Image (cartoon, rainbow, N blue to C red):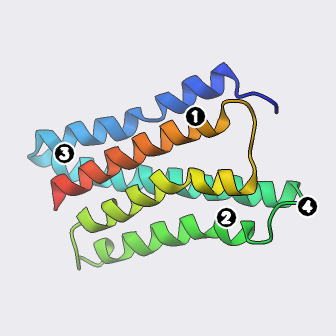
Amino acid sequence: MSRVSEAARALGYAGLLPQAAALLAVFKGGPWAWTGLALAYGYAALIFSFLGGVWWGIGIAKPEAPRWIFLAGVMPSLIALAGWFPWMMGWTWPGPELLALGACIALSPLVDWAIGLKPEGWLALRRNLSISLGLLTVLIGLMSA
């Protein structure tokens, strides 16, 4: 692929809507707050894990990819699982985990840059989407802390 398609761009930005809905639910408070927090963590974890799958797939498809790409490919799922575990056990409220997950998502385009993904518009799209999703996730984390 030499250029990011309009469909990929439109669907990418539409992918921010679930996190925006989670933010509204947390902001609304009451019984919606718990649903919003669960949606926020779950959606951010899914997207971060998806990015890891993309990196893993690139490692399989491109023998010239850096050797560390497979580690980068599995880390998002492991980070998401590690952040979910304390919340699942009732040890912490998801605020700190949302902050960490949001920061990881916001920084994830650095992996794309390091592995040399260069379709026209790709890094700009990834930067915009990741920073937006990361900031929404961090904001929800701050609201729940």
| Neighbours of disc 3 within 10 Å: few (<14), some (14-19), many (20+) | many
Looking at the rendered image, the disc whose residue lies closer to the viewer, 2 or 4, is 4
**Is 10 in front, or is 36?**
10
- Answer yes or no: do the residues labelled 4 and 1 have beta carbons within 8 Å? no
- Measured Cα–Cα span from mark 1 to mark 2: 20 Å
Q: Which mark is residue 63?
A: 4
Image point 49% across, 45% down: which residue? Answer: 130
Tell me which numbered mark, 4 or 1, is placed earlier along the sequence: 4
Image point 66% across, 51% down: which residue? Answer: 112
- The kind of residue on which mark 1 rests is Leu
- The kind of residue on which mark 4 rests is Pro
The percent position of residue 114, horizontal first and vertical second, equals 69, 57
Q: Residue furthest left?
A: 30
- Measured Cα–Cα span from mark 4 to mark 1: 25 Å
Looking at the rendered image, the disc whose residue lies closer to the viewer, 3 or 2, is 2
Reply above or below: 88 against 64. Answer: below
Q: Quadrant of residue 67?
A: bottom right
| Neighbours of disc 2 within 10 Å: few (<14), some (14-19), many (20+) | many
Residue identifier under label 2:
73
Residue identifier under label 3:
26
Determine whether the residue tagged by mark 1 lies in a helix, strand or loop: helix
Tell me which numbered mark, 1 or 3, is placed earlier along the sequence: 3
- The kind of residue on which mark 2 rests is Gly
The percent position of residue 92, horizontal first and vertical second, equals 22, 74
Determine whether the residue tagged by mark 3 lies in a helix, strand or loop: helix
Residue identifier under label 1:
125
- Measured Cα–Cα span from mark 1 to mark 3: 27 Å
Looking at the rendered image, the disc whose residue lies closer to the viewer, 4 or 3, is 4
The percent position of residue 80, horizontal first and vertical second, equals 46, 66
- The kind of residue on which mark 3 rests is Val
